[in-house]
Image (cartoon, helix red, strand yellow):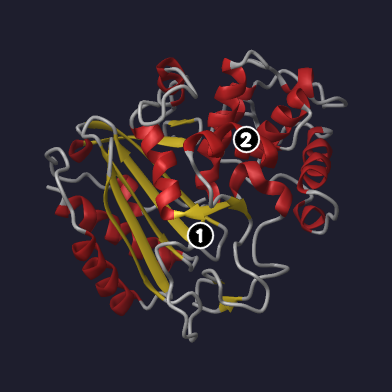
């Protein structure tokens, strides 16, 4: 995955967030829709204890007539990864497994070189796996349940030796799918069931689902669009393989996603009782020293030092090539935000990057 330019940009110091109106957010979105020619844009800005602004503008489908709304559900792509890490933390807190639980303990017939790889290493993209692993085309053709497809893809990849040394950073969708399958093996429940019952329901998230949210033949939710703006109708081929869930197939409304992001912003204080503060300290702290040129990555978050955040910010981008989302959290300044669009590609990423910068500037 390519992360946005903003990850490499140092912004001026930012005072603690005070206010940004939904009206101002609407104006920012409309300006970018006009300039960047995207089908729709949405954004939500929040503090520790409230939503400051929420706005959506544009169309569910380019060339269509149905406006996108604030109730619409947006594909989160790889921003699902921190949810999988959070689910792992919940199961660890329940005593069902450990951060150092190994692949060999949970998945049979694993290659000896993969057997000692830990859940922790999977959470850091340091498990010796490639970005999308092997057998991607066969993975896309799998039938049956998402769990069955995931099991096939993960186990087939784990029969082969690691393509690179353990401990070296390599962003890996396969790694998080493997982590999800480890959770399934320990609990004997689908990842999709676990994420809803143990994370979304306690957080009050009612709009969460998997894959693209729309109905075939209708414009009842935002359609995805490729990098050139061509709409993709709901149905086969509109998303990554269903079995990829733990690495990036969740969708939900912006208001619900803000509940989840706020939970991380406050280290669990916005919705207490799910995880102790120590679990967030673990997920928000790099557990290994990055080599020069490598990002600091932990449990589905990039850890980025930013002056405007007063120190460490948490961030991630997500895309299924037909949608895009960027999230930033500034725990020391007690605010965060997410920006979304129903188009993939570099143009969408650049537009969201610029929009994120303007939101930050408006909060100064």
| Image quadrant assignment for residue 129 | top right
The x and y percentages for residue 187 are 74, 25
The x and y percentages for residue 145 are 81, 49
Which residue is painted at 47% across and 80% down in the image? Answer: 66
In space, the residues marked 2 and 1 are separated at their CA atoms by 19 Å
| Image quadrant assignment for residue 174 | top right
Question: Given this view, does label 2 or label 1 mark the residue nearer the observer?
Answer: 2
Q: Which mark is residue 268?
A: none
Residue furthest top as drawn: 95
The x and y percentages for residue 231 are 56, 77
Which residue is painted at 28% across and 42% down in the image? Answer: 50
Q: Residues within 10 Å of mark 1 (few under 14, many from 20)?
A: many
* Count of numbered badges drawn on the protein: 2
User: Is the residue under label 1 in contact with that under label 2 (CB below 8 Å)?
Assistant: no
Which residue is painted at 51% across and 30% down in the image? Answer: 299
> Which numbered disc flags the more N-terminal residue, 2 or 1?
1
Closest to the observer: 264 or 304? Answer: 264
Identify the residue position indicated by label 1 in the image.
73
Q: Is residue 166 visible?
A: yes
Closest to the observer: 254 or 119? Answer: 254
Residue furthest right as drawn: 109
Identify the residue position indicated by label 2 in the image.
197
Q: Is residue 242 left or right of residue 345?
A: right
Which residue is painted at 40% across and 20% down in the image? Answer: 281
The x and y percentages for residue 76 are 51, 52
Label 1's element? strand
Residue 281 sits above or below residue 86 on the image? above
Residue 270 sits above or below residue 17 on the image? above
Q: Residues within 10 Å of mark 2 (few under 14, many from 20)?
A: few
Q: Is residue 177 left or right of residue 113?
A: left
Label 2's element? helix
């Amino acid at each position: 995955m390519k992360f946005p330019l903003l990850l490499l940009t140092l912004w001026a110091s930012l005072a603690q967030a005070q206010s940004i109106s939904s009206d101002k957010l609407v104006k920012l979105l409309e300006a970018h829709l006009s300039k960047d020619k995207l089908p729709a844009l949405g954004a939500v800005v929040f503090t520790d204890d409230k939503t400051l602004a929420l706005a959506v503008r544009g169309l569910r489908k380019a060339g269509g007539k149905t406006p996108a709304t604030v109730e619409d559900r947006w594909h989160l792509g790889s921003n699902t990864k921190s949810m999988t890490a959070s689910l792992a933390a919940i199961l660890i807190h329940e005593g069902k497994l450990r951060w150092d639980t190994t692949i060999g303990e949970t998945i049979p017939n694993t290659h000896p070189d993969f057997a000692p790889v830990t859940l922790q290493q999977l959470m850091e993209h340091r498990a010796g796996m490639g970005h999308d692993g092997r057998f991607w085309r066969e993975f896309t053709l799998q039938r049956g349940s998402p769990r069955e497809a995931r099991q096939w893809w993960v186990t087939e990849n784990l029969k082969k030796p690691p393509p690179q040394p353990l401990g070296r950073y390599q962003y890996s969708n396969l790694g998080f799918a493997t982590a999800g399958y480890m959770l399934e093996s320990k609990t004997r429940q689908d990842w999709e069931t676990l994420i809803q019952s143990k994370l979304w329901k306690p957080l009050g998230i009612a709009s969460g689902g998997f894959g693209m949210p729309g109905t075939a033949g209708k414009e009842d939710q935002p359609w995805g669009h490729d990098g050139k703006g061509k709409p993709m109708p709901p149905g086969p081929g509109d998303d990554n393989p269903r079995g990829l869930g733990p690495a990036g197939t969740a969708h939900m409304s912006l208001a619900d996603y803000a509940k989840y992001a706020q939970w991380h912003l406050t280290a669990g204080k916005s919705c207490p009782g799910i995880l102790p503060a120590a679990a967030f300290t673990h997920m928000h702290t790099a557990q290994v020293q990055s080599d020069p040129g490598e990002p600091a990555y932990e449990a589905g978050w990039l850890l980025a030092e930013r002056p405007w955040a007063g120190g460490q910010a948490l961030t991630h981008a997500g895309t299924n090539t037909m949608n895009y989302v960027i999230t930033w959290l500034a725990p020391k300044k007690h605010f965060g935000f997410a920006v979304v669009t129903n188009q993939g590609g570099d143009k969408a990423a650049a537009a969201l990057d610029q929009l994120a910068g303007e939101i930050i500037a408006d909060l100064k």
